[in-house]
Image (cartoon, rainbow, N blue to C red):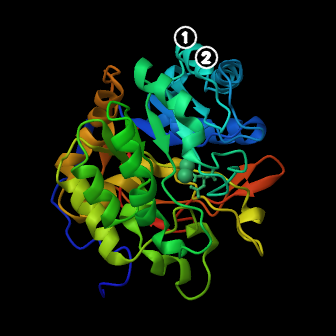
Amino acid sequence: MTAEKSPPNAIQSPIQSITLTRPDDWHLHLRDGDTLAAVLPHTARQFARAIVMPNLRPPVTTAAQALAYRERILAARPTSGPGAGFQPLMTLYLTDNTPADEIVRGRDAGVVALKLYPAGATTNSDAGVTDIRHTRAALEAMQRHGLPLLVHGEVTDSEIDLFDREAVFIDRVMVPLRRDFPELKVVFEHITTRDAAQYVAQAGPHTAATITAHHLLYNRNALFQGGVRPHYYCLPVLKRETHRQALLAAVASGSDRFFLGTDSAPHPTHLKEHACGCAGCYTALNALELYAEAFDSVGALDRLEAFASHHGPDFYGLPRNSGQITLVRQVQNVPDALALGQGKLTPLRAGEQLAWSLAA
Ligand SMILES: NC(=O)N[C@@H](CC(=O)O)C(=O)O
Ligand SMILES: [Zn+2]
Ligand SMILES: [Zn+2]
């Protein structure tokens, strides 16, 4: 295989099975209604908890909305098996007008973080922040009350090349934010570049990053392999191979600044396979198997447990989980599509194989 083909997955250890503390997903889209009902069991089967993104329509901007959304998620949980104990961790969508009081109400309601979407950056971000200076009062309250800020780290300036938007965000937003709010916990979500991995590695203990399985497994060639491949389109968009290698090096380093966040983002198949296809990869169906493959490809399976199950709760100040799950090196087929209401949902790797399986 050439260096530009993905996934190379060159190294494979002799390890046949691996048992982990039950992991958590620190960046997840569950949506609502029929979609919530269809996707939640996939996450709940693998993960004890997940940080649930607030980019619904309309967005979850108040503590009261977060509590109501939490109830709908709990009602959609499987009634038996390991998924029955799944716990959603709720977030609020930060706007130009989020009052400091809402931060306090959120904290009292069990909200664990606020999400910053630069306006127009990604799916359902129209209500997002137009200028981070407008959020000063909210950020001060978050810093005071210990609530982390989760950022979709891309500038939206149309002058900036799509592939450079994350790197430019570091200089324009992250560096000033860190300087102005040194004690605020910040998670740079779904990082995709060497620039972001290097930035986070040296930014001190209050800055961390989530990394998706698809950004560890694929480079931007996957978008154009023999034709346009909409199911590999997400934001931030896949980057070139050197960046993928830097993300793999970051997780293989064992640094506690990096942890698991799938960014699993379900969109109906017909809206992905569309003239203007939606951004988001549906990875929740086989999230851990995909991560195992990525870690295995660089001989770093021994780093998977801390990435998936320790670094996240440690950063958020939450207890680690007590149960366990086991992955075995056993090939499985990924279905072509799943049912989603009247339509379909296409998982990442649809119709292909996975090298790992979750033990029953
Ligand atoms: N990642 C994506 O491509 N899409 C996400 C939004 C996001 O996380 O940016 C979605 O909600 O569909
Ligand atoms: Zn995002
Ligand atoms: Zn996301």
Tell me what residue is drawn at x 20 percent, y 65 percent: 12
The extreme top residue here reads 108
Q: Is residue 64 left or right of residue 191?
A: right
Q: Which residue is mark 2?
A: 101
Tell me what residue is drawn at x 28 percent, y 43 percent: 307
- Disc 1 residue type? Asp
Image quarter of residue 245: bottom left
Image position, residue 250 (x, y; %): 24, 56
Of residues 108 and 223, the one drawn nearer to the viewer in this rendering: 108
Label located before the other in sequence (1 or 2): 2
Disc assigned to residue 275: none
Reply above or below: 123 against 50: below
The kind of secondary structure element at disc 1 is helix
Image position, residue 103 (x, y; %): 56, 21
Reply above or below: 329 against 273: above
The Cα–Cα distance between marks 1 and 2, rounded to whole angstroms, is 11 Å
Q: Which residue is mark 1?
A: 108
Label 2 crowd bin: few (<14), some (14–19), many (20+), radius 10 Å: few
Tell me what residue is drawn at x 51 percent, y 62 percent: 236
Tell me what residue is drawn at x 54 percent, y 42 percent: 28
Image quarter of residue 41: top right
